[in-house]
Image (spheres, rainbow, N blue to C red):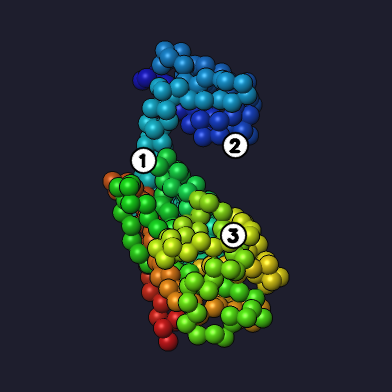
C-alpha cells in the first residue's frame, strides 16, 4: 500500500463515488484511459480486484468497500487540515457538505447565504432528498451533517434541536371546513388527501397520528414535491399536511388556509444530526454555530 499514490487513491474514490469511470474522468478533468491506468496500478499494488463489472453496473468488491472507507477518512482529514490552516491564517476555506430533507430547503439556503457572505471563499454542496434517502447518505457518511426533523432512533447519532417545524392541515380557502374551530380528526376520513411519497418524514409523522386514532384516510394523490402538493391544494384537488415552513408566502396571500383540526399542528422540531464519533470539520463546526445562532433570532422574531 505504501506504493499507492494519493492521486491513485483520489481517482479510486471518485470512481467508487460515481460508480463510473467516465464520470470520474469528467470530475477530475482527466481522460478515461488515465483513470483506467491509475485503477489498474492501484489494483496491482493491492493484489486484489477493487471493482467488479456486472452488465453495465460497476460494483465495489469487499476490499474495494474497505478502501473507500479508508480513502474517505484520509481525504476528510486532509481537508480538515487545510481548513484548520486556513482558519489559523484568519480565513475560512474548504467545502461544506450538507444533506437536508426536502422541506428544509425552504429555510436552509437562506441561512447558508448569510454564512457564505461572511466566508466568501468556501464551497458548498447541498444535497436535498427525502427522509429515507437522507438516512442512507448518513449511513454512508457522505456529508458533514444533516438537517431533518425525525432523527432515526436506531442509529448512534448526535442530534441538536434548533427550530420548530409544526405540521399543519392545509386546504383550499373555499374548503367547507375552513373557519371551523376544533374540527375532530375523524371528520377528515372522507376527504381526498394529497400525501408526500413513502419515505418522506412528513408522511410518516402524519401517518402516525392517523394510525394512533385508527383513522384510514383516502390518499388520492402522492407527490414527492411540497410545491406540487401546494399547487394541487390550491387547485382544489384535496387537502394535505405540510410543514408551516413551506406555506408562509402563499398562506399569507390567502390562497391556502390552515384547518383548525384537533391533534394538529403536529409539534415537530428540526435537528442538526451527525453520526456520533464523527469529527466535524472546522467549517462544519462554524456553520453549525451559525445555524444555532440564526435560529435563535428566527424564534425570537416569531415570538414577538
Ligand atoms: P421529508 O422530511 O421532506 O422527507 O418529508 C421532512 C422532515 O424530516 O420533517
The dot on residue 27 is 2
Please identify the quarter of the rendering in which residue 299 is found.
bottom left
Asked if residue 279 is positioned above or below residue 24 in the image, the reply reads below
**Distance between the Cα atoms at labels 1 and 2?**
21 Å
Which residue is label 3 attached to? 219
Find out if the beta carbon at label 1 lies less than 8 Å from the nearest ligand 1 atom: no
Residue at 61% in and 74% down: 171
Q: Position of residue 48 (x, y in %)?
A: 43, 14
Q: Does label 3 or label 2 sit earlier along the sequence?
A: 2
Q: Nearer the viewer, mark 3 or mark 1?
A: 3
Asked if residue 19 is positioned above or below residue 266 in the image, the reply reads above
Residue 234 seen in this snapshot: yes
Outermost residue toward the right in this view? 235
Asked if residue 165 is positioned above or below residue 58 in the image, the reply reads below
Q: Are marks 3 and 2 in contact (CB under 8 Å)?
A: no
Q: Nearer the viewer, residue 11 or 160?
A: 160
Which residue is label 1 attached to? 77
Q: Secondary structure at mark 1?
A: helix
Residue 19 in the figure: left or right of residue 93 = right
Residue at 54% in and 68% down: 189
Q: Position of residue 180 (x, y in %)?
A: 54, 85
Residue 78 seen in this snapshot: no
Q: Nearer the viewer, mark 3 or mark 2?
A: 3
Tell me the quarter of the image containing the C terminus: bottom left
Q: Does label 1 or label 2 sit earlier along the sequence?
A: 2
Q: Secondary structure at mark 3?
A: strand
Amino acid at each position: 500500500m505504501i506504493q499507492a499514490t494519493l492521486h491513485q487513491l483520489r481517482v479510486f474514490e471518485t470512481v467508487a463515488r460515481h460508480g463510473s469511470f467516465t464520470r470520474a474522468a469528467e470530475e477530475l478533468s482527466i481522460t478515461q484511459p488515465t483513470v483506467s491506468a491509475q485503477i489498474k496500478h492501484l489494483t496491482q499494488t493491492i493484489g486484489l480486484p477493487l471493482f467488479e463489472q456486472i452488465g453495465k453496473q460497476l460494483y465495489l468488491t469487499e476490499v474495494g468497500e474497505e478502501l473507500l472507507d479508508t480513502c474517505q477518512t484520509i481525504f476528510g482529514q486532509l481537508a480538515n487540515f487545510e481548513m484548520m490552516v486556513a482558519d489559523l491564517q484568519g480565513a475560512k476555506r474548504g467545502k461544506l457538505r450538507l444533506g437536508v430533507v426536502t422541506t428544509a430547503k425552504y429555510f436552509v439556503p437562506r441561512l447558508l447565504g448569510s454564512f457564505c457572505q461572511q466566508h466568501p471563499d468556501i464551497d458548498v454542496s447541498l444535497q436535498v432528498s427525502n427522509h429515507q434517502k437522507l438516512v442512507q447518505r448518513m449511513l454512508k457518511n457522505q456529508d458533514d451533517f444533516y438537517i431533518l426533523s425525525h432523527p432515526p432512533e436506531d442509529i448512534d447519532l448526535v442530534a441538536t434541536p434548533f427550530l420548530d417545524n409544526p405540521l399543519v392541515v392545509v386546504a383550499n380557502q373555499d374548503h367547507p371546513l375552513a373557519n371551523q374551530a376544533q374540527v375532530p380528526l375523524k371528520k377528515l376520513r372522507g376527504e381526498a388527501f394529497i400525501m408526500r411519497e413513502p419515505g418522506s418524514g412528513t408522511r410518516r409523522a402524519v401517518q402516525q397520528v392517523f394510525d394512533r386514532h385508527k383513522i384510514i384516510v383516502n390518499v388520492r394523490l402522492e407527490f414527492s414535491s411540497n410545491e406540487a402538493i401546494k399547487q394541487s391544494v390550491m387547485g382544489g384537488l384535496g387537502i394535505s399536511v405540510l410543514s408551516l415552513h413551506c406555506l408562509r408566502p402563499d398562506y399569507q396571500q390567502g390562497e391556502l388556509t390552515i384547518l383548525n383540526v384537533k391533534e394538529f399542528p403536529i409539534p415537530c422540531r428540526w435537528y442538526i444530526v451527525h453520526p456520533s464519533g464523527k469529527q466535524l470539520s472546522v467549517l462544519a463546526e462554524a456553520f453549525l454555530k451559525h445555524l444555532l445562532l440564526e435560529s435563535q433570532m428566527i424564534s425570537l422574531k416569531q415570538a414577538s
